[in-house]
Amino acid sequence: MRIRATVAAVSGALALSAFVAPSAQAAPVAPLADPGFPLKDAQQGDTKITKFVVNGGKDLVVGTTAKKKFTIAVTATDPKGVAGSGGLLWHGEKLNERYLDGMLTPVDDEKCVHANATTATCTVTITVNPKASLENNGLGNHLAGGGWKLLAAAGGKDDDYVVKTTLKPGINLKRAAKLTVNASPEPVKKGRTITVSGALTRANWDTKKYAGYTKQSVRLQFKKKGASAFTTVKTVKSDSKGNLKTTVKASVDGTFRFVFAGTSTTPAVTSAGDAIDVR
């Protein structure tokens, strides 16, 4: 899926130019603010990026309505001092209009903490809005997973700079998931059949609704009344609509739940428990 990426890409580049140079006339602005594209790795002088952390190193999980904020922290060094640093995430084969299909850019200035005269960590905040268009920090289903790349830039007080366009952020963007369970009948006689049903759904960023996550393995677990831990009873696969259904024999009072381990595009999720009364 392609998007009209020019506006988002240029605005992101212009935003990053502020991190790289304190002056609009400074040379480091050019590699980022140039709307010609593609953006490329660039180096002038001895500014170095030594560390970067996206969303605290944790996967970012987004649903269908609520906005999600995450941070990009870029640590840089320069013998003359660090003027600023920052970053953005992009998705696609290449960082140009033809191959770019998603971009998440900061809108606020970076906040910097100077460890000493030569080292600083600057943090930018990005808001993901699942209701927005792709050009405005929105998401589509094709953007789920670990295909994102980090563009990071840093500038020294002496107008040195560095731009890295294809860093690996180390996280996945995931479609939020929901999991339900229901055990019936209640109460049930010992030895009779219990039907345990539920549904595994996840956020559809294209339709802005939740839909069934099909053909996924989900564990049915049981915890005997008075016990401290759940034990896996069997593994069930979700059907073509994300529904789950299986049967077990009633033996003792306890609680059933479903557990989904997650995938590269969808987080792990555990249902609430449903207690069963065996008589």
Image (cartoon, rainbow, N blue to C red):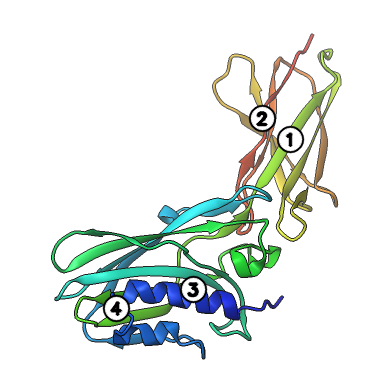
Evaluate whether residue 86 shows in this view.
yes
Observer-side mark, 3 or 1, equals: 3
Query: Mark 3 or 2, which is nearer the eye?
Result: 3
Dot 1 crowding, Cα within 10 Å, few <14, some 14–19, many 20+: many
Which residue bears the numbered disc 1? 180
Mark 3 neighbour density, 10 Å: few (under 14) some (14–19) many (20 or more): many
Query: How dense is the environment of label 4, judged by Cα within 10 Å: few (below 14), some, or many (20 and up)?
Result: few
- Which residue: 77% across, 13% down? 278
- The spot of residue 240 in percent (x, y) is 85, 52
User: Which residue is identified by label 4?
Assistant: 23
Q: Amino acid at mark 1?
A: Thr
What's the amino acid at mark 2? Ala
Report x, y in % for residue 157.
Answer: 20, 76
Tell me: residue 42, above or below residue 249. Answer: below
Mark 1 and mark 2: Cα distance apart in space: 7 Å
Mark 3 sits on what residue? Answer: 12
Q: Earlier in the sequence, mark 4 or mark 3?
A: 3
User: Left or right: 256 with respect to 93?
Assistant: right
Kindly state the secondary structure of the residue where label 2 is placed.
loop
Relative to 75, 103 lies left or right: right
